[in-house]
Every structure is written in structure tokens, then in C-alpha cells.
Image: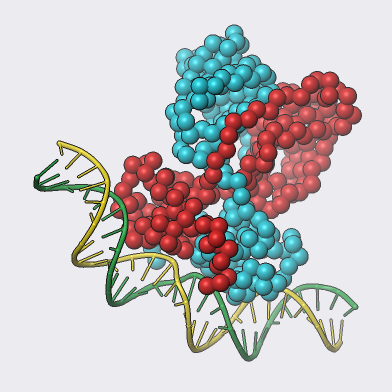
Chain colours: A red, B cyan, C yellow, D green
Amino acid sequence: MNKEAAFEEQNVGKRIGANLRQFRISKGMSIEALAKQTSVSKLTLLKIEHGEANPTLSVIWRIANGLHIPITALLSIEAEVSIARKQDALKLSSSNEVFIAEPLFHSHGSMELYRGYLQPYGEYTSEAHRPGVVEFITVMSGQLAVEVDGQTYHLEEFDSIRFKGDRPHKYINPSSALAILHFVISYVPSS
Amino acid sequence: MNKEAAFEEQNVGKRIGANLRQFRISKGMSIEALAKQTSVSKLTLLKIEHGEANPTLSVIWRIANGLHIPITALLSIEAEVSIARKQDALKLSSSNEVFIAEPLFHSHGSMELYRGYLQPYGEYTSEAHRPGVVEFITVMSGQLAVEVDGQTYHLEEFDSIRFKGDRPHKYINPSSALAILHFVISYVPSS
DNA sequence: TGAAAAAGTATATTTTAATATACAAAATGT
DNA sequence: ACATTTTGTATATTAAAATATACTTTTTCA
């Protein structure tokens, strides 16, 4: 089984197994209880937890479903504390860009966070991202209109929007005040 | 195959297949070229793209690897446009909770978004979440102090913090103004 | 329009995931 | 210490994933 060398090298199975065990135990379930709840046999679950399995998508899905967690949660890893301070007003006003996006933290798995500033009455058209990308935008200050697929959505302060980012879309600031925005860009699925 | 009813009902296979096809085509590859690059047979790829397969983890991983995308991008399933409006001030002020968290959207893969309100001088201690969980908090209005591992971090308006959420932590509003917060809770891995 | 590439179909085979059952070992709780 | 639950092992069977090969249809494009 040479074509699976890298697969085994990276311990994909073991990592998933360890995760599964954590999830199961954190829910206080026995393997048999989980077997019942997921319709996956006890032995299969056991093998997966030990990293000795190569489960099918169906089995992976049934487990995630039975645990009420997303499939991708079965692949998680850690991170530490860090803070992203707001940039100086100076630095900001000196820019003549209509739209500025500041990455808040280094890319975290399949997710990125940005702080965005859109000038009064400014418009910005974004390229389509990769398929599967989903954007979440929250208005922290001011107002925002988002145009996706011909539709325009108006957001007031503290409103949020979610949309598929794999098509072109446009941000519009319909007001005379600077719009301060919060972006989450994600690949992550919905179960 | 009754235990896979929900699996098939939700078209998990078809949606993932459609994903794969998008990725492949966006890279301008033929199925055979992909077969060569991933060490997965042409027929298997074909079946997966058509949603007629139940691929093993190993195959899923080899494909993601061959395409140089994270496994979660491949397993990522759709999402539409939806908006979460800020709750009425009424509903808010009528509450006597110190801390209120409103889910913004339904759980999105390994990530959840909340809007949070912490009363003036209010304090809230959060349980430790699951291992692997990371929290991102952004102050949309007011101020916030976050206590993690004995350390206290002070945030001003529009600042953000990231920390491991798998230990107890505390939110403190050190000011006389309502703090309005944005939360991202994530399991997401870093590879 | 005609050749070449890509996509899809058909069939048969090999490999292995998944399950069932029974039993042994280890951990847990009273 | 003992009964009970939970975990892990052994063995055998069934179902199906993955592949190989050859062929047909469709698409591409020069």
C-alpha cells in the first residue's frame, strides 16, 4: 500500500481517532452507547479511535452526526493567546484606499479574520473566492450594503450577513460615516 | 442500507462530488490528470464527482492532498445568504442577565458566531470548552477585559483577542457602558 | 468536419471496510 | 473484594470500495 504512505506518515487516522475519543468521552458516552447512537458498529468505532481504520465517508458522517458535531470538527488542533489592536486613526486617514482589510490573526485552519474599513460612499468589488468559501460580515460601526448575485442586502450597525463567497460580490457604504467591519472568511461546511 | 438514509437524504456525497468537480475544473485538470496526481483511479474519481461513491478517508485525503487543499475544503458543503439582525433594544433591556449571547447563524461547520452583550461592570465566567476550541472575540462597542490562565487582557473598541477556549475564562466589562461583542468559536485545525 | 482529448459506461476482479458474535482483560464503582 | 461496565481481542462473514481494462459517447478545437 505505497500510495498511502503520506497518509499514514501524517497520522491522519490516528489524529481523527484521538479526536473522536475526546469528543466521545467529553460527552460521557461509552463506545457501545456511541455505536447505538451512530449506527456504526462498536468494533469499527474502536478501530477508528485506535487509528487502525480507514473509515468511509458514510461512517465518518454518521459519527459526526451522532455526536452532533460537524465532520470537520474531527480534525482539530490547538492555538495560543494573541491580540490584534485597532490601527491608529492616523495610519488610517492617511490612506486613500476606498477599502482596507487588516488581517486580525494569522490564518487559522480553514478560517481567516479581518477588520475592514470602507470609506463614506465607497464601493469595493471583491473577486470570487475559491468554491466552498463562505463569508461572514458584521457591521461594527456605520452601515453596509452587500451585493451578491444581483441582490443587495442592507445592514445596520451590529447586523451580520453570511453568503457564499465563491462568486463576485460588492461592498457599498451608503452613508457619510466610515464603515468599520468584521470579516470571517471560511471554508468550513455546515454538517 | 437503512442506516445511511439520512446520509443520502442530505446528499452528502453529491455535494462533496460537486465540490471536487469545481476544484478540479478551477485548476484546469482532467479526471485522468487528477487520477495520476492523487493516485486515485479515474473511475473512483468519476464516481465521487457523480455522488455515486462512498470514498474512504484515505481516498478523500489523497484527493485533497493532490489538489493542495485542506481536507475540510473538500468536505465543505454549501451555504446561502442569510442575515442576523441586531435584536431590539427592548428585548435586550428587559433581560436581567449579565451576559447574553445570541447565535448569529446556525453552526457552520467547525465554527460558530455569536453576538454578545455584557452589562456595565458585569462579569461572566465561561466553562472550559472542548479541547481544541479556539475563541476569537472582537469588541464592537465599549470595552472588555478577558481573563485566561490568570492573565487579564484589556481590549478597547474594535480590538480583537484570540485564545484557547479549552480552559475556564472570564469576561469583564470594566466600564459604565454596555459592551457589544463579536464571538467566533472554532475547532478549526491548522493544516 | 474530422481528429484528439476528455468524459462516461460496462464488466470483472481484488482488496478491504464493516459487521456479528463470542470471549478476555481492564477499569469502575459500591 | 466483587459485581458490573467498559474496553479490547479473535475469528469469520458479508458488503462494498477500489481498481484494471476495454469500449462508447461527448466535447473540444484546430
* The quarter of the displayed image where residue A179 is located: top right
| Nearest the eye: B72 or A7 | A7
| Left or right of residue B50, residue A24 in this image | left
Rendered residue at 55%/36% (across/down): B134
Q: Is residue A55 visible?
A: yes
| Nearest the eye: A41 or A180 | A41
| Residue A148, placed above or below residue B175 | below
Q: Is residue B47 visible?
A: no
* The quarter of the displayed image where residue A23 is located: top left
Rendered residue at 70%/72% (across/down): B33
Q: Quadrant of the image for the N terminus of chain B?
A: bottom left
Rendered residue at 57%/46% (across/down): B189
Q: Residue furthest top?
A: B176
Rendered residue at 37%/44% (across/down): A25
| Nearest the eye: B187 or A14 | A14
| Left or right of residue A115, residue A6 in this image | left
* The quarter of the displayed image where residue B63 is located: bottom right
Count of all numbered marks drawn on residues in the image: 0
Residue B111 is situated, as x and y percent measured from the top left of the image, at 56, 40
| Residue D19, placed above or below residue B141 | below
| Residue B6, placed above or below residue D15 | above
Residue B83 is situated, as x and y percent measured from the top left of the image, at 63, 35
| Nearest the eye: A77 or A104 | A77
Residue A102 is situated, as x and y percent measured from the top left of the image, at 75, 33
